[in-house]
Image (cartoon, grey):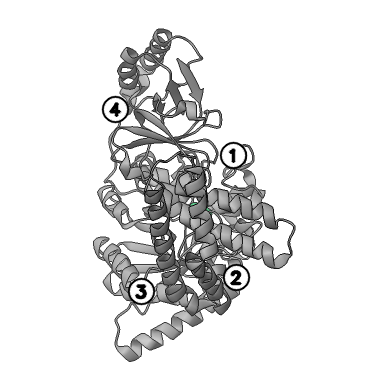
């Protein structure tokens, strides 16, 4: 038996067949085909779907935003009618007897080789063709690989999981996820926790095709992955592991490993009994030193998580990551679509606070419906409030939807990635415009709706006193605050060593932020992952924090701990 040691992301023991999930550009496999005409038909169907997608994108998005971008989209759409492109791909299918995806790749490679030394015009043409071909390959492979296509328990292994990959996971047969690269603070990891999918980051796990289809067991509590075990021992291991965090095991034979697992578990009996005897305080109010209540709210990325927030008795929604509504959608979500989601959330939370964060697209959170420029360093580029202010139409649509939803509950607006006062005042101007329109049209909204900000950049901490005079509340995003303070990409596999949300630098920033908020009479909470860390709660309470917002699965743990 082989045991790989990784880092746990979300607890749970799973057994299933491993599936190596390749990135779209790697997903293209060469398949020899007999029926060339059928393959050519598939290719033409993909061309027409791509044309439809680009047409929609052109009409609904870019004509409203930027004429130049609209031209690029139209140029790409015209490629679906380009005979040079389709004749060449068809030719590869016929002469090489290969699948359409592979023929597109062959054409692309040949085109790049032929024109590599050409001028800027050709370089930009190559990049358009690449972009278009990626779309065709995505459409073609979509019909081949979907998470919902699995028919048996599967453990999916990603090289680099994107948030959009995790969003697509259907839990019917996907029982666990292994990420070869990535960090505990990436949005992919945060979503895995939000979706309660047992998961592990394991850089040592072999991503080669030989692993495909093998039976493995993953233990999301300890981060261990077991493979190549005898059939008869698999269920025994799963049974022993359920709910346990095992810190042992080298590469030994299966019986020896099972004995060790059992020993480790029996050594913990005393502790287990203690835990079981502890009262479940999940419904009792949580108090802090000065007798004010300490709020434990829920972070959600999708309306489907509301059930869990309500079941776990969340004091409110402290962070609704609305960008995931955009990431899931191929076209820009309309005001009506957004209004429906926000108002339903407000209604179901029955007067409890619902903090809706305006879209934090950018960095690793990319979406098909907003074409972002290619940036060398996207975490430091057009992200969060910067993107919203650059595309005021998208921003205004979202603000209108939130404002309308505020008539149905205690809705608040929160702005991500604030670094300066002007970003708040600019937003307020847009809000005032909308309010005036609503007043004229007799549209209901909460006239006292609060506008708060995320404090997640060192600049915001340093200017917290000024920002607190303009904002109605602060919510500290320790995930990004840590990333930007230590100059360490939160998605990078080396993050663990350098990324430390408990570091005195972060603690000092947290204290300064809380002091600035309270000096100006506004509330401050933490909605980054540090808020869900029991080792940080005492300090946050001591600093005077008014609450935390955590993934739904962590609400009980935090409430029990504080109680
Ligand atoms: C944060 O940065 O801490 C935060 C809560 O926002 P996100 O994780 O969505 O960037
Ligand atoms: Mg953030």
Q: Residues within 10 Å of mark 2 (few under 14, many from 20)?
A: some
- Earlier-in-chain disc, 3 versus 1: 3
Q: Secondary structure at mark 3?
A: helix
> Up-down: is 186 above or below 82?
above
In which image quadrant can residue 275 be found? top left
Residue labelled with disc 4: 276
Residue placed most toward the observer, 187 or 57: 57
Residue labelled with disc 2: 466
Residue labelled with disc 3: 335
Real-space Cα separation, disc 4 to disc 2, in angstroms: 48 Å
- Earlier-in-chain disc, 4 versus 2: 4
In which image quadrant can residue 300 be found? bottom left
Q: Secondary structure at mark 4?
A: helix
Name the residue: 50% across, 70% down.
78
Q: Position of residue 362 (x, y in %)?
A: 54, 60
Residue labelled with disc 1: 493
Tags 4 and 2 touching, CB below 8 Å: no
């Amino acid at each position: 038996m082989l045991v790989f040691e990784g880092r746990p992301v979300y607890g749970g023991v799973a057994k299933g067949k491993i599936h190596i999930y390749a990135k779209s550009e790697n997903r293209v496999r060469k398949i020899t085909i007999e029926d060339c005409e059928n393959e050519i038909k598939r290719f033409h169907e993909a061309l027409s779907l791509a044309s439809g997608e680009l047409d929609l994108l052109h009409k609904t998005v870019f004509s409203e935003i930027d004429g130049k971008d609209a031209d690029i989209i139209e140029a790409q759409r015209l490629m679906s009618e380009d005979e040079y492109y389709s004749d060449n791909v068809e030719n590869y299918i016929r002469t090489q007897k290969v699948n359409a995806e592979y023929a597109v790749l062959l054409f692309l490679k040949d085109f790049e080789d032929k024109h590599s030394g050409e001028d800027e015009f050709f370089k930009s043409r190559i990049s358009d063709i690449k972009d278009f071909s990626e779309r065709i390959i995505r459409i073609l492979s979509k019909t081949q690989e979907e998470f919902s296509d699995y028919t048996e328990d599967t453990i999916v292994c990603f090289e680099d999981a994107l948030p959009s990959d995790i969003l697509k996971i259907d839990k019917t047969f996907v029982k666990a996820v292994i990420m070869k690269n990535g960090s505990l603070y990436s949005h992919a990891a945060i979503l895995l926790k939000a979706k309660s999918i047992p998961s592990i980051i394991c850089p040592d796990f072999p991503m080669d095709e030989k692993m495909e289809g093998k039976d493995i067991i993953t233990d999301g509590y300890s981060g261990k992955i077991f493979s190549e075990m005898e059939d008869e021992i698999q269920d025994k291991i799963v049974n022993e592991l359920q709910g346990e965090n095992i810190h042992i095991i080298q590469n030994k034979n299966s019986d020896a490993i099972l004995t060790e697992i059992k020993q480790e578990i029996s050594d913990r009996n005393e502790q287990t009994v203690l835990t079981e005897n502890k009262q479940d305080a999940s419904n009792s109010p949580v108090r802090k030193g000065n007798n004010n209540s300490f709020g434990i709210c829920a972070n959600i990325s999708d309306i489907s998580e509301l059930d869990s927030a309500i079941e776990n008795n969340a004091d409110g929604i402290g962070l609704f990551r609305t960008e995931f509504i955009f990431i899931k959608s191929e076209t820009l979500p309309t005001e009506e679509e957004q209004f429906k989601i926000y108002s339903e959330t407000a209604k179901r939370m029955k007067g409890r606070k619902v903090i809706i964060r305006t879209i934090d697209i950018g960095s690793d959170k990319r979406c098909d419906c907003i074409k972002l420029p290619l940036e060398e360093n996207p975490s430091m580029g057009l992200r969060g409030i910067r993107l919203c202010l650059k595309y005021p139409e998208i921003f205004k649509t979202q603000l209108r939807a939130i404002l309308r939803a505020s008539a149905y509950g205690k809705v608040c607006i929160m702005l991500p990635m604030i670094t300066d006062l002007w970003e708040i005042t600019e937003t307020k101007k847009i809000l005032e415009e909308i309010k005036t329109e609503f007043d004229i049209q007799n549209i209901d909204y909460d006239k006292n709706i609060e506008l708060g900000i995320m404090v997640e950049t060192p600049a915001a901490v340093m200017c917290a006193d000024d920002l607190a005079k303009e904002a109605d509340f602060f919510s500290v995003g320790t995930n990004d605050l840590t990333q930007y303070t230590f100059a360490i990409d939160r998605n990078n596999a080396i993050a663990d060593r350098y990324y430390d949300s408990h570091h005195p630098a972060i603690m000092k920033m947290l204290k300064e932020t809380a002091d600035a908020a309270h000096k100006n009479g506004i509330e401050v909470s933490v909605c980054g992952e540090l808020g869900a860390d029991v080792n940080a709660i005492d300090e946050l309470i001591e600093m005077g924090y008014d609450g935390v917002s955590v993934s739904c699965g962590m609400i009980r743990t935090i409430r029990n701990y504080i109680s």
